Amino acid sequence: DTGVSQDPRHKITKRGQNVTFRCDPISEHNRLYWYRQTLGQGPEFLTYFQNEAQLEKSRLLSDRFSAERPKGSFSTLEIQRTEQGDSAMYLCASSLTSPYEQYFGPGTRLTVT
Amino acid sequence: QKEVEQNSGPLSVPEGAIASLNCTYSDRGSQSFFWYRQYSGKSPELIMFIYSNGDKEDGRFTAQLNKASQYVSLLIRDSQPSDSATYLCAVYIGNQFYFGTGTSLTVIP
């Protein structure tokens, strides 16, 4: 069990550019979550997949954000036309359906200049 | 009202003391509660989880649930400097995890 991995670990981009992050969950986990965390705050839910199906998406999530999990394994999170307010740590977590304790990856720190 | 609320602290305890962290939740139907430890610049690490059927102890950590008052607590016995971190409480509601803002704990040698 190699744990949840995320790539890249750090990303610096200019405002208006598109960025894509990848998450590889723990191999037997069928649930995958994306979160955003800013300084002094807890992780904020963005979206969640069960296998390849995206079952929930935060109402606060701009349509500039899109996520996929095409074969029910790894997932990608894309942010289009980045804004400075998108600067944050983007966290991925995975779990089983039951029990559903979730485990986090190391995160991708995004800086938009 | 936020689903999960925590006192942001900071909470300081001397080495060897008991650290007590609390979290309140708003959904009375919540049945699953999680504590994560997060070191500065790192991602959250799951340390304890508790379901509605009672308290749980794991080594130096004890999680306690008070359903009547809608709070869950984490006790850390024999606190060590390495326990200095932010502790996040999370509640599982309707396929989502809701996190508090975390409590910063400092253990003073």
Image (cartoon, coloured by chain):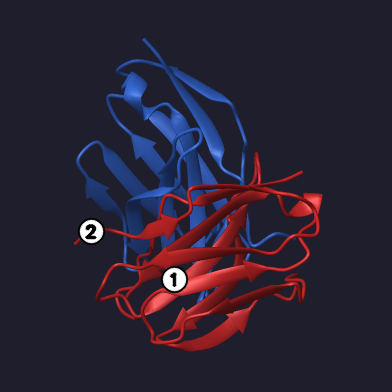
Chain colours: A red, B blue
Q: Say which residue appears at 34% left-offset and 15% top-offset.
A: B15
- The residue type indicated by label 2 comes to Thr
Image check: B43 left or right of B103? Answer: left
Lateral position of residue B44 relative to residue B17, left or right: right
Dot 1 corresponds to which residue? B31
Residue A112 position, x and y percent, is: 73, 48
Which residue has dot 2 on it?
Answer: A2
Find residue A81 and report its image quarter. Answer: bottom right
Q: What element does badge 1 sit on?
A: loop
Report the chain holding disc 1. Answer: B
From where the camera sits, is residue B27 visible? Answer: no
Identify the mark at residue B54; answer none if there is no mark.
Answer: none
Q: Distance of mark 1 from mark 2, alpha carbons?
A: 29 Å
Q: Who's the residue at 24% across and 48% down the image?
A: B57
Residue at 34% across, 80% down:
A30
Q: Quadrant of residue A54?
A: bottom right
Please determine whether, in this image, residue A98 is positioned above or below residue B73.
below
